[in-house]
Image (cartoon, rainbow, N blue to C red):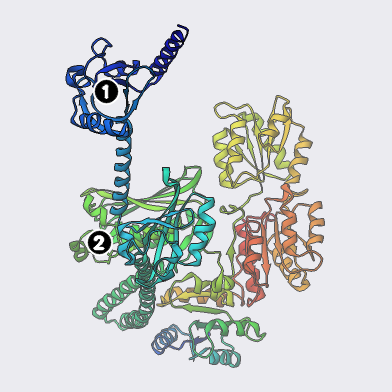
Amino acid sequence: MEPQPFVDDIETYAQDIVDTVREPLLMLDTNLRVQSANRAFYETFHVSSIETENQLIYELGNGQWDIPGLRTLLEDVIPTSSVFNDFELEHTFPIIGRRVMLLNGRKLRAGSHSAIIVLAMEDVTDRRRSEADLRAIETYAQDIVDTVREPLLILDTTLRVQSGNRAFYHTFRVSPEETENRLIYELGNGQWDIPALRTLLEDIVPTSSVFNDFELEHDFPALGRRVMLLNARKLQAGHHGELVVLAMEDVTDRRRAEEEAANAKEASEIANQTKSLFLANMSHELRTPLNAIVGYSEMLQEEAAEQGLESFVADLEKINSSGKQLLGLINDILDLSKIEAGKMELFLETFELDALIDEIAETIAPMVTKNMNVLKIDRAADLGHMHGDQVKVRQALFNLLSNAAKFTHEGTITLEAERQPMDGAEWIVFRIVDTGIGLTSEKLLRLFQDFTQADASTTRKFGGTGLGLALTRRFCQMMGGDVTVKSVPGEGSTFTIKLPAIVSEPVAELHGGDDGDDAVIVSTDRRETDPAPAPSTCVLVIDDNAAQRDLMRRFLVKEGFSVRCAASGEEGLRLAKQMIPIAITLDVMMPEMDGWSVLKALRADRTLADVPVIMLTMVDDPARGLSFGATDYLTKPVNRHRLSRILKQYSCDSPPCPVLVVEDDRVMRTSMKRMLVRNGCRVTEAENGEAALALMREERPSLIFLDLLMEVMDGFAFVENVRTHPEWRSIPIIVVTAHDLTAVERKRLNGNVETILHKEGTSIDDLLSRVLDALDNCAVPRMAGV
Amino acid sequence: MPKILLVEDNEMNRDMLSRRLQRKGYEVMIAVDGQLGVEMARSEVPDLILMDMSLPVIDGWEATRALKAAKETSSIPIIALTAHAMSTDRDKAIAAGCDDYDTKPIELSRLLGKMEVLMGGAGGSSAAGGSR
């Protein structure tokens, strides 16, 4: 028959489709016996066709399909409705375990075959599981959101509220019903319709998916005025689409607390200032009667001595010394209160350490000998100058020495002083060593605290308030240094003061204000922080060869220079620092430290960086020398005339070099000149800056006295011009002016002039005497014999 | 006998210092405020003025400036007596034209030393000359 193969084809075709379907399929007859199954069925349930076909479905695989739900379906639903969809069956299958199956059934009539039931099974276990997970995650997220104590709002991108958390509803006293699905601005009678918030949500959030700590101050009807800190995140929330989480932190209390803390701090600062002011005034009031006590007792002492009333003298001496002691304490309190009030200032000047030490040694001598002690001074030879507050250095040393004297009997008190390079800077180190009672480590800890002596018994035995050490330390710290102490009980103590050799001006103040304007002498530093130590007229010769040194010295002296010699690089550096020569001749080939190293060290030292260095070498390699910062370069044997010519650039034709007076007032100029000449100076004069520059080109002065306000070229322009010439850079300039300098003008001069002398309110004699002081400080060479 | 003008408003200080100076052989004149000090300096032309700085009417700095500005008194040396060893006061005194300063309480021998230096020279300046 023709049609049969065709039908067979169709059947094979149908079977192929059935086998291709990835879902397990069972074909049952109306008696619920399996006609056939597809490949997916066998694979899924791990059974073979032999144990499946022609079996009752309930008997399959040891009755694993004998499920009440399935029975109902097959026996009750199918016969009547011939179709069912998505019957969900959860069952534990022996081999594949617990599964959720979605069953679809069709009753089909397939050609000549009797009716069959096609049962399709979809394993939805995994899908169901992930759906459950998702639900759990959402619940979990919601739980977190609700647990957060900060109010949170979840908005969609149209700014409608998706939900709020419990804290939100609680804080703003609204219900979810009146909140969800509403525009945020409509919430709670428009309490969130705040311009700043609109900006935030409409302008900022759309462009930047995150913002933090947006502060919003607003009157909320339910809460009153509040400061809210808003944080927002834009996030992709799966099928929810894009959401904005808005977190609100009520920082009102915190802000208030901060404000209160700030107020309290301010109040306490004011109180502290008031206290300091009170102390300052009090000290003044205490001093007045004390002056009378000290004065009258001293006076009576003199009278008693004259009249031979010896017994009175001793008692009057006690009154007098007690008064002085009390006065000292009051002064300490005043100093301390000034430090606390930030009113203590530094008066920086350059002074000679040797002179200071001599003076202190002399002052302290009576106190030292009182307890039968011996004072030893042990100082380095090269102490030189220090730039700092001389009064405070003196007081610090005096305090420590008098302490040492107080706590030592029949012992030795040693004052040591030396220079020490540390961290690329020069430091002055003082050590006060005694052989006194010493201190335990516990006492050491409390030693520098205000009003604290090592212990109460000490106070009874030795007197004093314990202010001295605190003050000493504060003074040293103000100058950028500090005091440390080492001590062995019963053996003695060592106090060490370390101060920068060049103390820099405290940052905050530039001698401005009232005091600054009245100040006569304001030492301004040549460079930002370091003052010029007095420049000398010396040329420094550094050469290891004695014959060469001698030759060079004789030649230079003949040319009118004074000369110092150094036999090694180290010695040369030390001398250079000490004397700041006008120029250095430097031999390259030296043992140990060679000329290049010396040059490098010189250039690295801020006080010496500008000193011209002339390298002397056998090897003609000028590029190298100049690249190392040498000023000039000569090959040996040295062409003396060239050397002389080079040096004259930094000196003048016929030393001693002149002092240049630049001043437009003829009377003033003449009297200055006369006085300078009287003091042994050679003087040149100019009536304005331009004339002065012309003079300087002819002959280099060793020092310039400069008026500021002049016609043609004023002092400011002059200073700036001079400093552009390297060979003039080291000439000290002393400004003599009647002009009250503004802060800006001071700044213009700062770093470029040595000293500023104020003319106003000063007699000419007095001014001249101060000019002389300045002259002395600058160590200008004078004519011999004057 | 050198004539000293003491300008001081505090009675006890004035009393003490004047008596002690008199005992040392000075003739002492007294002014109790800055204004009187300037007037007396003009009329009496003392050899030296000891000037307290915090004075009523016009203070010591102003009085000093006035004295140093006037021809007839500019050469009279003035020693400022400042309350405390405060560098600002000291500098202000020198700025005003004082030739020297001393701090209270007065240490007589120190003050006498300074007075002698100033009166020993022919007036105004204590030039720090000399070759080195």
* Mark 1 surroundings within 10 Å by alpha-carbon count, few (fewer than 14), some (14 through 19), many (20 or more): some
Q: Nearer the viewer, residue A665 or A85?
A: A85
Horizontal and vertical percent for residue A328?
34, 71
Horizontal and vertical percent for residue A377?
39, 50
Which label belongs to residue A453? 2
The image quadrant where one finds the N terminus of chain A is top left
Residue A359 visible here: no
The image quadrant where one finds the C terminus of chain A is bottom right
Q: In this rendering, which labeled residue sits more in front, label 1 or label 2?
A: 1
Q: Residue at x 78, y 62 (%)?
A: A689
Q: Quadrant of residue A46?
A: top left
Name the amino acid type tagged 2: Gln
Q: Residue at x 71, y 59 (%)?
A: A704
In the rendered structure, which disc, 1 or 2, sits on the residue that comes first in sequence? 1
Name the amino acid type tagged 1: Thr
Work out which residue is located at the far front of the displayed protein and give it.
Answer: A1
Question: In the figure, A286 relative to A99: above or below?
Answer: below
Q: Residue at x 68, y 36 (%)?
A: A630
Q: Which residue is mark 1?
A: A30
Horizontal and vertical percent for residue A577?
56, 44
Q: Secondary structure at mark 1?
A: loop
